[in-house]
């Protein structure tokens, strides 16, 4: 345009032909320029469209819920999981994503899923409940087990926070494509990328209303705009957009363009993250996979293409409803659906979920752990762009119970006198598998800052004691559960030239106590005496063998837990005791699939035997006494007394840190309560952390600790006062487990061995006889 | 404890072996003893009557039945419909795949010492199929799934150890077999199989003497 003006200034005689020459040259230059531009744009179009079109963040999944007869699972928990997965109530579960809920029976039609070790097919499963257990499942012929699909718990996002759930054209629900074309670009299947008719219409509207209001863009142009260009509106950009749209249509089929559009279109904003594509929008607004959407839901999403925030159904429900119904009317008008269908759909609610956060911030503490374990094996850019599918051991049901326990208990404690909030952390693992099931990183489980479960390293106090008693029980020739331990005051050399006199919590000495009771009551003097007898070095090495690396100096104060650990390390240590002496590195990730569902990597279960099972069995026995008659007693206010539990309280100096670590047969749970400024909490292990643990275990339905002794254990009767062998006939004697070969010999018994009456009778008879002779 | 005695009894009957139970010394302290106390009150029980899975049977076979988080508790087991007990000749059909359990590499197929219940059996069968298709990673994943359901079932650990051995991870195979031994008291044929696996794993690790010791334990177990 500017060139023309220049040439006009040269209006002289004989200039006319020269002018035409110029114009010709200019035209040629223009053509060449346009050609070059076209070639350049073509390269851009093809490069973006033929390669990997989107950076898809890694998706992180919870464990899939397994269903089989005998499984411990309550009906309510099952419903919680189904609702989180977006299952919809119906009278009969006729298709994937539907459930029919009865009193003790729930029918579900699972969705099917590609797992690491194979595909789980979508199928109808009827689950019957009996109390907190699955009484039975039935479905296809001979069905013995089924899996729900795993809950998506988060993604690993790059800085620009883009996310997508990629869908293929053949995975779209009925009416989606038809209605989208009807509403946004009626001539889509006829035009070559731009629609002159549409542009004319748009120009007319824009001229009459005086502003750029109507796009008149085809779907192809919209895709180009989203894909390649910035959002500012001007005529040059419009021209580029049109050229690129035409080029795109030249190279690619309508189906390919449509599929890209479905995955690219902007449909909402979730905090700082844009919701792109119908796949993700379906999860974001309905918590359902796109394939399952019904007519009224499809119409809502299609209506939102025009302005996702303007028609946001959560914020502007009336506006969104009007828009949805307009789309439905248009569909009926064009004969896609009947009037009756349109009316039925218009009578339906919007059906959007109340929440609508795309599990990104939901479980920050657990996601933090997953990311740390992933970064050991993957580069950041792979994690944020390759669409990897990460399968974890995360159990959303247990996580919910852990969070509730932390929050409710802290609320009960109220504020500290100086208004500083109490903090807490919690970690739950599978006792036999070493899998991390739940993590709470602080008093506010949604807060993604300081992850105390992994990073708060605090002195562990009496949590060290099982390591002392375990070290002693490894010497069966000297120590058994019933060996008397002296709880008298003790003074040791703490460091060269410094003495140290630990005290019991109740400031009294308890004399000679059986070894198991000294642990159950958490007597400090007895523990320090025992620890110094077996050797501080030995105890510290036992801690290492239990799975925790540390560089604690071998001072006697270590025997009362002056050394610091994170809750995660404590879980690792107690896991080894819960697991029969086998240490297994705590894992959060089970395996990883590529975006296409191909197996990529496994994180296998690994164990290493660190202690023999007999010694661990005895240690566990002593730790069950903590719960029955020791510092952990209050657990049975929440857990049925038929459930055997084992654990240990921990309290540090001046009541700064309150700890509890304990396990059932299936769960290890570690809780910590303290303050970020490390000031006093006024809580002991029993009054603080144990209360959180109790609240959790009360809700988690733990399995009773197995009481099958290993082969090297024998039962024998003993006198708890002396530790010597006894007999069932003796008052106060107890039957307790010993290392085979080290049990005490049976005592003499407390019933007369020979019936003296008979002897006396006999003797009298003999004497009588003799008297008779003497007569 | 009654259940434990029952378990011992059933095992004794099913395995048809009354040899001395194996004690598994892991750390060399303490003396092995026979666990005669585990073998009391044996009464013949039949476990082959098919019945609906949900029905509580009085068959008296105790299996560890899982809960959601990988624990397990003893409950009455029930055979599956038309489910033959798995035997060392190893033909079993599960409703899931209907394949046959082929002979295993180390010492035959699963030990015929206990009836496993539905999901665990189904997963062991799936793992067997995956293994024969050369998908050892898949087999591993299926077996770990079974382990989460029945964490103390030594049969599962036995198979897991076998697969790891095939993958060349001898150290882990030995550890898994030892973990199986920790839960296999009173099941002598299974103990023998596990010790045999320990021996093979030690051989692969170049520990001939250790392997010989494990073989002796295997013979003693039987």
Image: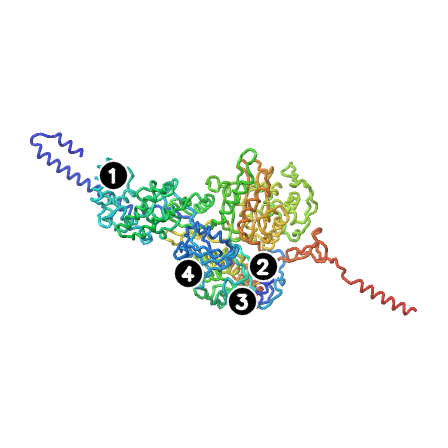
State which tag comes first along the sequence, 3 or 2.
2
Q: Earlier in the sequence, mark 3 or mark 4?
A: 3
Which residue: 43% across, 65% down?
B98
Can I make out residue A649 in this image?
A: yes
- Quarter of the figure with the C terminus of chain A: bottom right
Q: Pointers 3 and 1 in contact (CB under 8 A)?
A: no
**Looking at this view, is A474 or A3 the one in front?**
A3
Mark pair 4, 2: CA separation: 33 Å
User: Is the Cβ of the residue at disc 1 closer than 8 Å to that at disc 4?
Assistant: no
Number of callouts: 4
Residue at the disc numbered 4: B134
Neighbour class for label 2 at 10 Å: few (<14), some, many (≥20)?
A: many
**Label 1: few (<14), some or many (≥20) within 10 Å?**
some
Q: Earlier in the sequence, mark 4 or mark 2?
A: 2
Q: How is the image coloured?
A: rainbow
Q: Where does label 2 land, which residue?
A: B24
- Residue that label 1 marks: A237
User: SS class of the residue under badge 3?
Assistant: loop
State the CA–CA distance, disc 2 to disc 1: 79 Å
């Amino acid at each position: 345009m500017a060139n023309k003006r220049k040439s006009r200034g040269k209006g002289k005689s004989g200039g006319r032909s020269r002018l035409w020459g110029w114009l010709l040259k200019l035209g040629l230059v223009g053509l060449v320029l346009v050609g070059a531009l076209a070639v350049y744009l073509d390269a851009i179009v093809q490069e973006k469209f033929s390669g990997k079109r989107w950076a898809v963040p890694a998706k992180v999944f919870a464990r899939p819920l397994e269903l089989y007869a005998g499984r411990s699972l309550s009906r309510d928990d099952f419903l919680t999981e189904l609702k989180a997965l977006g299952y919809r109530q119906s009278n009969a579960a006729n298709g994937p994503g539907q459930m029919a809920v009865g009193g003790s029976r729930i029918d579900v039609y699972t969705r099917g899923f590609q797992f690491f070790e194979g595909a789980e097919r979508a199928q109808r499963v009827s689950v019957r409940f009996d109390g907190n257990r699955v009484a039975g499942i039935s479905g296809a012929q001979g069905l013995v087990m089924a899996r729900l699909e795993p809950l998506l718990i988060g993604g690993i996002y790059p800085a620009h926070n883009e996310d997508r759930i990629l869908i293929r054209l053949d995975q779209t629900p009925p009416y989606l494509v038809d209605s989208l074309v009807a509403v946004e670009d009626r001539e889509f299947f006829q035009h070559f990328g731009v629609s002159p008719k549409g542009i004319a219409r748009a120009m007319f509207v824009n001229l009459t209303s005086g502003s750029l209001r109507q796009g008149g863009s085809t779907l192809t142009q919209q895709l180009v705009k989203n894909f390649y260009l910035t959002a500012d509106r001007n005529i040059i950009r419009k021209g580029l957009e049109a050229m690129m749209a035409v080029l795109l249509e030249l190279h690619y089929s309508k189906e390919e363009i449509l599929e890209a559009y479905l995955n690219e279109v902007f449909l909402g904003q979730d905090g700082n993250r844009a919701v792109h594509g119908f796949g993700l929008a379906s999860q974001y607004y309905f918590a359902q996979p796109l394939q399952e959407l019904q007519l009224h839901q499809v119409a809502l999403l299609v209506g939102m293409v025009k302005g996702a925030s303007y028609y946001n159904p959560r914020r502007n429900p009336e506006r969104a409803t009007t828009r949805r119904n307009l789309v439905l009317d248009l569909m009926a008008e064009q004969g896609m659906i009947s009037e009756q269908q349109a009316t039925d759909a218009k009578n339906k609610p919007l059906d959007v979920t109340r929440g609508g956060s795309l599990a990104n911030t939901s479980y920050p503490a657990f996601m933090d752990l997953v990311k740390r374990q992933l970064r050991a094996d993957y580069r950041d850019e792979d994690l944020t762009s390759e669409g990897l599918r990460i399968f974890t051991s995360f159990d959303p049901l247990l996580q919910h119970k852990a969070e509730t326990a932390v929050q409710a208990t802290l609320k009960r404690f109220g504020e500290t006198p100086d208004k500083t909030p109490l903090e807490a952390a919690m970690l739950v693992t599978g006792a036999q598998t070493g899998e991390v099931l739940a993590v709470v990183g602080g008093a506010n489980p949604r807060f993604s800052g300081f992850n105390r479960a992994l990073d708060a390293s605090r002195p562990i106090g009496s949590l060290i004691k099982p390591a002392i008693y375990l070290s002693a029980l490894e010497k069966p020739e000297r120590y058994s559960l019933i060996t008397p331990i002296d709880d008298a005051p003790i003074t040791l050399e703490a460091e060269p030239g410094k003495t140290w006199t630990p005290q019991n919590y109740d400031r009294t000495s308890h004399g000679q106590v059986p070894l198991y009771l000294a642990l159950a009551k958490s007597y400090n003097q007895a523990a320090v005496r025992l620890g110094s007898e077996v050797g501080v070095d030995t105890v510290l090495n036992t801690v290492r063998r239990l799975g925790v690396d540390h560089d604690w100096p071998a001072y006697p104060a270590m025997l009362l837990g002056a050394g610091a650990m994170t809750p995660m390390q404590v879980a690792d240590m107690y896991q080894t005791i819960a697991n029969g002496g086998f240490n297994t590195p705590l894992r959060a990730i089970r395996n990883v699939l590529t975006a296409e569902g191909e197996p990529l990597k496994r994180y296998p279960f690994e164990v290493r035997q660190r202690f023999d099972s007999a010694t661990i069995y005895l240690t566990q026995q002593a730790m069950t006494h903590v719960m029955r008659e020791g510092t952990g007693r209050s657990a049975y206010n929440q857990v049925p007394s038929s459930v055997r539990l084992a654990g240990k309280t921990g309290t540090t100096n001046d009541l700064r840190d309150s700890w509890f670590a304990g396990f059932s047969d299936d769960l290890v749970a570690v809780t910590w309560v303290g303050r970020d400024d490390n000031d006093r909490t006024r809580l002991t292990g029993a009054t603080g952390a144990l209360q959180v643990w109790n609240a959790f275990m009360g809700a988690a339905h733990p399995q009773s600790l197995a009481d099958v002794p290993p082969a090297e254990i024998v039962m024998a009767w003993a006198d708890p006062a002396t530790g010597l062998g006894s007999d069932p006939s003796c008052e106060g004697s107890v039957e307790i487990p010993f290392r085979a070969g080290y049990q005490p010999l049976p005592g003499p018994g407390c019933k007369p061995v020979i019936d003296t009456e008979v002897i006396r009778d006999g003797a009298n008879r003999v004497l009588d006889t003799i008297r008779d002779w003497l007569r | 404890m009654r259940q434990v005695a029952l378990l011992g009894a059933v095992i004794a009957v099913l395995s048809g072996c009354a040899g001395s139970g194996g004690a598994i010394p892991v750390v060399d302290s303490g003396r092995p003893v026979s666990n005669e106390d585990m073998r009391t009150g044996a009464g013949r029980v039949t476990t082959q009557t098919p019945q609906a899975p949900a029905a509580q049977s009085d068959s008296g076979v105790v299996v560890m039945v899982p809960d959601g988080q990988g624990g397990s508790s003893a409950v009455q087991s029930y055979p599956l419909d038309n489910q033959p007990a798995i035997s060392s000749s190893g033909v079993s059909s599960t409703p899931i795949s209907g394949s046959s359990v082929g002979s295993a590499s180390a010492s035959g197929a699963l030990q015929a010492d206990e009836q496993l219940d539905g999901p665990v059996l189904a997963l062991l069968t799936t793992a067997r199929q995956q293994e024969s298709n050369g998908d050892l990673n898949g087999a591993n994943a299926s077996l770990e799934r079974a382990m989460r359901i029945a964490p103390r079932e030594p049969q599962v650990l036995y198979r897991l150890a076998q697969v790891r051995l095939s993958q060349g991870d001898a150290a882990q195979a030995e550890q898994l077999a030892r973990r199986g031994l920790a839960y296999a008291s009173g099941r002598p044929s299974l103990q023998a199989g596990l010790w045999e696996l320990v021996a093979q794993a030690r051989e692969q690790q170049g520990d001939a003497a250790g392997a010989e010791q494990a073989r002796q334990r295997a013979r003693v177990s039987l």
